[in-house]
Image (cartoon, rainbow, N blue to C red):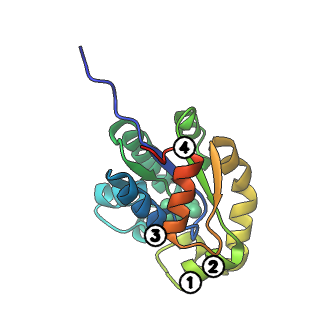
């Protein structure tokens, strides 16, 4: 008999600046499980930062790496998993999320831009971040909503407060 494949206890999706990494870490600490982030996996595989992948090979290549990273992490991690903000654009990745405990971390433009700030590591927000973020969110909100079992706002909340709200939303409080 083979052991069942691991399934993440929670998968976080949402736009850049939603707080996926800090909330994911806080949530993993609450649950006593590991934390994984597909952006980190992609950087490890490529051996360079995402900003350089965009410059050297272009966004389509990054999206190919991202699709593979999402599939690998969903099949090989039983802790908390954060996906890069654009991962839900891919239909194959969305299909893999079906039935999983996915949480959409929603956030206001104001808070997101404040968090992302002048961080140049996000190539899609390098020019005119407020307008770009708004456009990305308009395009992606229906997809975040489609894949999510629960929606939790991170606006005006600390990562720990959001982690508790996620535990509640996924009914993991007694886990
Ligand atoms: C992207 C978001 C980034 C990263 C890449 C592309 C996007 O992740 O995957 O820069 O398309 O929104 P975060 O959501 O963690 O910033």
Residue 128: percent from the left, percent from the top? 67, 81
User: Residue at the location (63% across, 57% down)?
Assistant: 152
Per the model, the C-alpha gap separating discs 1 and 2 is: 6 Å
Residue at the far top: name it.
1
Q: Nearer the viewer, mark 4 or mark 2?
A: 4
Query: In the image, is residue 147 above or below residue 85?
Result: above
Per the model, the C-alpha gap separating discs 4 and 1 is: 33 Å
Is residue 133 or residue 115 the one in the foreground?
A: 115
User: Residue at the location (42% across, 43% down)?
Assistant: 175
User: Residue at the location (73% across, 76% down)?
Assistant: 131
Q: Residues within 10 Å of mark 2 (few under 14, many from 20)?
A: many
Residue at the far left: name it.
1
Quadrant of res 48 = bottom left
Residue at the far front: name it.
174
Numbered-mark total: 4
Q: Are marks 1 and 2 in contact (CB under 8 Å)?
A: yes
User: Of the residues under marks 2 and 3, which one precedes in the sequence?
Assistant: 3
Per the model, the C-alpha gap separating discs 2 and 3 is: 23 Å
Identify the residue under disc 1. Answer: 117
User: Of the residues under marks 3 and 4, which one precedes in the sequence?
Assistant: 3
Identify the residue under disc 3. Answer: 55
Per the model, the C-alpha gap separating discs 3 and 4 is: 42 Å
Identify the residue under disc 4. Answer: 171
- Element at label 4: loop
Taking the image as drawn, is residue 5 in sight? yes
Identify the residue under disc 2. Answer: 113
Q: Are marks 2 and 3 in contact (CB under 8 Å)?
A: no
User: Of the residues under marks 4 and 2, which one precedes in the sequence?
Assistant: 2
Query: In the image, is residue 161 above or below residue 5?
Result: below
């Amino acid at each position: 008999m083979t052991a069942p494949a691991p399934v993440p206890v929670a998968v976080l999706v949402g736009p850049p600046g939603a707080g996926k990494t800090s909330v994911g870490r806080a949530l993993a600490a609450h649950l006593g499980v590991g934390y994984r982030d597909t952006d980190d996996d992609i950087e490890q595989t490529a051996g360079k930062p995402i900003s350089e992948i965009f410059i050297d090979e272009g966004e389509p290549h990054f999206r190919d790496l991202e699709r593979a990273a999402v599939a690998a992490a969903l099949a090989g991690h039983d802790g908390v998993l954060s996906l890069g903000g654009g991962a839900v654009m891919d239909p194959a990745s969305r299909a893999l999320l079906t039935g999983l405990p996915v949480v959409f971390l929603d956030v206001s433009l104001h808070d997101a831009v404040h968090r992302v700030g002048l961080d140049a590591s996000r190539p899609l927000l390098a020019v005119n971040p407020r307008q770009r973020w708004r456009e990305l969110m308009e395009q992606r909100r229906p997809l975040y909503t489609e894949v999510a079992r629960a929606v939790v706002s991170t606006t005006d909340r600390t990562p720990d407060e959001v982690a508790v709200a996620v535990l509640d939303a996924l009914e993991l409080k007694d886990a």
